[in-house]
Image: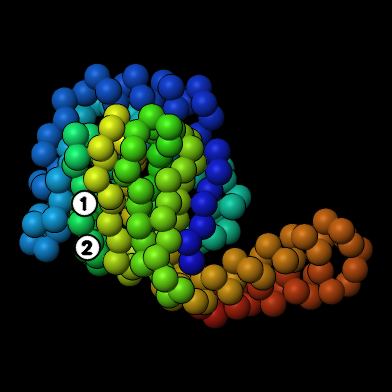
């Protein structure tokens, strides 16, 4: 499942975050890449312990926790601290797959089920920089307005096309879902959306509570914690 989460951050939050991020010291992005990734990766990243990364990262985590669309689609168990990257002057990240296991700052290991990219620059500020995700039904090209986020399966092959004008500034991070399987997670999401719609249009229908029960009982059977 590839899902866009619109307006995760407000325009004011985006502007304040950008001011913080742009004033930080950026380093070569290869520091967090594995063997395969390092060969195809050419961008800059913020050191995870920098003040801007910590502050804006906390803001993002807070916004995610209050976003019903994200919570329903991701069913998150752990969200890794957001990282930040930027591309300019032809920089690119060739086809790669994200590492399957990453560590939290406390050393706890997290399985990366879903990848997230949150955009901090608007599409008209730079040329190129599309995120291309190879999905079951072919490649999808993603370039979203500032403040919007894309959620996609971490199992996918993906790349970022060369940025030939301006700067692409993004946050990227991973999460472990309570539902490991992408197909089961997508099914629960479809069901949740349909029940919400049904409940809004027909709140007193007895099937609303029956279907809500089915949703929770499936979640109870499949959730891993
Ligand atoms: Ni990646």
* Residue toward you, 140 or 76: 140
Query: Does any atom of ligand 1 lie closer than 8 Å to the CB of label 1?
Result: yes
**Residue where numbered disc 2 is placed:** 96
Q: Is residue 103 above or below residue 21?
A: below
Q: Residue at x 81, y 64 (%)?
A: 198
Q: Is residue 225 visible?
A: no
Q: Measured from the top left, where is residue 30 in percent x and y?
A: 11, 47
Q: Are marks 1 and 2 in contact (CB under 8 Å)?
A: yes
Q: Which mark is residue 93?
A: 1
Q: Residue at x 47, y 26 (%)?
A: 13
Q: Is residue 157 visible?
A: yes
Q: Measured from the top left, where is residue 100 in percent x and y?
A: 25, 67
Q: Which mark is residue 199?
A: none
Q: Is residue 96 above or below residue 86?
A: below
* Residue toward you, 29 or 192: 29
Q: Quadrant of the C terminus?
A: bottom left
Q: Secondary structure at mark 1?
A: strand
Q: Classify 10 Å Cα crowding around label 2: few (below 14), some (14-19), many (20 and above).
A: some
Query: Does any atom of ligand 1 lie closer than 8 Å to the CB of label 2?
Result: yes
């Amino acid at each position: 499942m590839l899902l866009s989460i619109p307006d995760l951050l407000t325009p004011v939050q985006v502007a304040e975050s950008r001011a913080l991020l742009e004033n930080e010291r950026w380093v070569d992005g290869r520091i967090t890449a594995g063997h395969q990734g390092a060969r195809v990766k050419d961008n800059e990243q913020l050191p995870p312990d920098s003040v801007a990364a910590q502050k804006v990262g906390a803001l993002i985590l807070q916004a995610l926790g209050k976003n019903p669309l994200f919570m329903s689609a991701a069913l998150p168990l752990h969200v890794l601290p957001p990282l930040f990257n930027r591309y300019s002057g032809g920089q690119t990240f060739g086809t790669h797959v994200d590492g399957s296991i990453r560590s939290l700052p406390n050393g706890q290991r997290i399985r990366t089920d879903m990848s997230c990219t949150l955009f901090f620059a608007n599409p008209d500020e730079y040329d190129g920089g599309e995120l291309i995700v190879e999905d079951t039904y072919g490649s999808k090209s993603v370039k979203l307005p500032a403040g919007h986020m894309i959620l996609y399966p971490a199992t996918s092959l993906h790349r970022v096309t060369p940025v030939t004008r301006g700067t692409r500034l993004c946050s990227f991070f991973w999460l472990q879902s309570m539902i490991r399987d992408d197909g089961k997670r997508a099914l629960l999401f479809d069901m949740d959306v349909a029940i919400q719609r049904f409940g809004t249009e027909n709140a007193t229908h007895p099937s609303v509570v029956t279907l809500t029960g089915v949703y929770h009982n499936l979640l109870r059977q499949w959730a891993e914690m």
